[in-house]
Amino acid sequence: MNNIILEPKFTQHLQWQGAVSFSLQRLLKTVASVVLVLSTGSIATAVQASETTPTAPVVIKGAFQSEPVTPALFSGDVRSLPTLPAWKQGDAVREIPRIQHPRPAAAKTGENQGGEQPGRSAAPVIDTLLDNQQNVAAGPENRAFSTLVVDIPGIAYTGVVPPDPVGEAGPNHYIQMVNAGAGSVFSIYNKSGGLISGPTVLSSLWTAGGACANGSGDPIVLYDNLAQRWLMTEFAAVGNHLCVYVSQTPDPVAGGWYLYDFLVPQFPDYPKYAVWPDAYYVSSNEFSPAAYALDRNQMLNGLPATFQRFTAPGNLAFPFQALIPSDHDGVTPPPPGSPNYFMRHRDDEAHNPFSSDPTRDFLEIWEFSVDFTTPANSTFIGPIQVELSEFDSDLCGLVSFACFRQPGTLNTLDPLREVVMWRLQYRNFGDHETLVGNLVTDLDDTDHGGIRWFELRKSGAAPWQLHQEGTYGPDEASRWMGSIAMDKDGNIALGYSVSSTAVFPSLRFAGRLATDPAGTLPQGENVILNGSFSQTSTTRWGDYSSMNVDPADDCTFWYTGEYVATPGGNWGTRIAAFRFPGCEGGVETIAGSSTGLYTTFAVCLNQTTSQTVPIILGGASAWDCEAAGLIASPGDSIITVIGGFANASGSVGGAVTGLSTSGALCRNLTTAQTVPLPLGGVTSWDCEAAGLTVSPGNAIRMLVAGQAN
């Protein structure tokens, strides 16, 4: 099919008013193959009308660009700001609304809590990918990453539902954010899970007047690894404002922040952000799904910044809907000139009911290329379709905020069927690029939720193609509210909520090694937290959770989500971190070697996490702590103890990698002599040169201490 091309004339004004989206929506319903050029009011060609055939990608050229926004500054230490008082019984409770925009038609109706619904076939339809997962069900021996290296309570109930828990790791910190009565709040932790500051109301950083002085919620936090900066965001309590906070340094505590207030044309509900080299990209639920590009280069330098905006046509069946932008992870940026990739899913039984294909559904991609110098050159191209196996968005209908069951109550939980879930993670492996995402689907036509996950790949100039997809739903419980990510080695972790009439709402995760069979998560289902209570006060759940990869090693996964913390149904949040042992991170592995010894053992101790790993050496003169199972993040305090007997092969000493060493200790147990060695970063030592007296056969212990790097 040919592209539809909309030239810049008139489009800037029309997009601000929302008229382009309405016109495109009508156009896409009636045109299957068309070449259209708008220039000085002329129309070139229009061919072959059809209401049901998928349309060609549209090239919209020329974005609306805002006036520049001058930032305010926060130059203090966030630890000096007031912390949010704990919520107590009798305090105010409020709900963050999820805005719905009525559509012209919906394929299915009904909001009952199960059973047959209008538009459903009498015979249940079973997800065709379930068997792939069941055939590789993991035993305990395959659970490669079940150990949590961090497992702590996150921010507690604030009186606002849903909490919208989100988090992100940086080189030395983890930041979690949730909704609260005065807007979004954040807490900052060290990488061991120790609280540094918070919870702090985000708008307490705001040093200027205006709408962003009073935030309202829907928080997002990201770490821009390409620039070594943090991004925290929310929308304002009044008006149509994106409130964006960009750190001035990698230090979110005392490094200062730039504060931007972007006034947008419609209320930016459910905003999702993404890091990209040329912009911070944003999606939102508006009358037509909106896509924004914020001038990242200007924002990183604290200079006046503009945004540009396009919109996509709405899907027919969802009154709430939004695209999601692709968020960069890793150290390798996208190829020069790469657009940002916005995505949504399309269940054609819901959105194209008269031409649906019972064997396939679709992902739809829009490519946003921004030119902040000449907005007329910016383009928004889509939808570019990628086929998936059939999935089912009809979960207690297509519009309800209630579906998944809990023990002991008729109250059910919001399935959030309408969007590809946070985040759409992007990586560049050099020979190929990846997009990893997930969405919820009905497993068997009974409002039984499972997670459809997918990996797309792109090589060179070739289009995005499906590399693998799977559906995860191993038992009768529903699984949803997923967040997925891939580490530097191509391993994948998926975190999610789980609930049923027998299982209280809980948090779990599953995963796969890059070498596992395609389309499966066979590394076991692992528990972050088993719930003990059902939520009875509201049906709202989520509206998202967050799986992120630690940029310090590009291996450790950090996940945060909600559960029910009290018998009264108030939510709580949890923060967990884990990794696949085979992923060695982006730095040297913690390892060592000895000279002059017949070594019998080594003990690797991470004092930060209290993990101890013993290694039997049996005469081997080298050891690898991380290969033996030690999990370490940069900055962790590490001690390695080596034991053996002196021989005549050389001077007793040793060397290490992966540590910024502080000192070593040499001890002759036979003579009770001890010699300390200050190392100051030096990675090798010689006990005898430092004064230790040794004879062959003497029992020797060496200790080296430092921080993981």
Image (cartoon, helix red, strand yellow):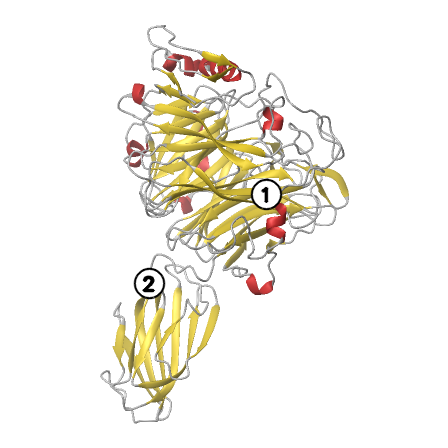
89 or 158: nearer the viewer: 158
Q: Quadrant of residue 121?
A: top right
Q: Which mark is residue 451?
A: 1
* Residue 386 drawn above or below residue 353: below
At 48% from the left and 21% from the top, the residue drawn is 55
Q: Which mark is residue 588?
A: 2
Instruction: For mark 2, give the secondary structure.
Output: loop
Question: Quarter of the image containing the N terminus?
Answer: top left
Dots 1, 2 in contact, CB < 8 A:
no
- Asked if residue 411 can be seen in this view, the reply is yes
Residue 71: x and y in percent read 33, 30
Dot in front, 1 or 2: 1
Q: Quadrant of residue 435?
A: top left
Q: Residues within 10 Å of mark 2 (few under 14, many from 20)?
A: few
Instruction: For mark 1, give the secondary structure.
Output: strand
Nearer-N-terminus badge (1/2): 1
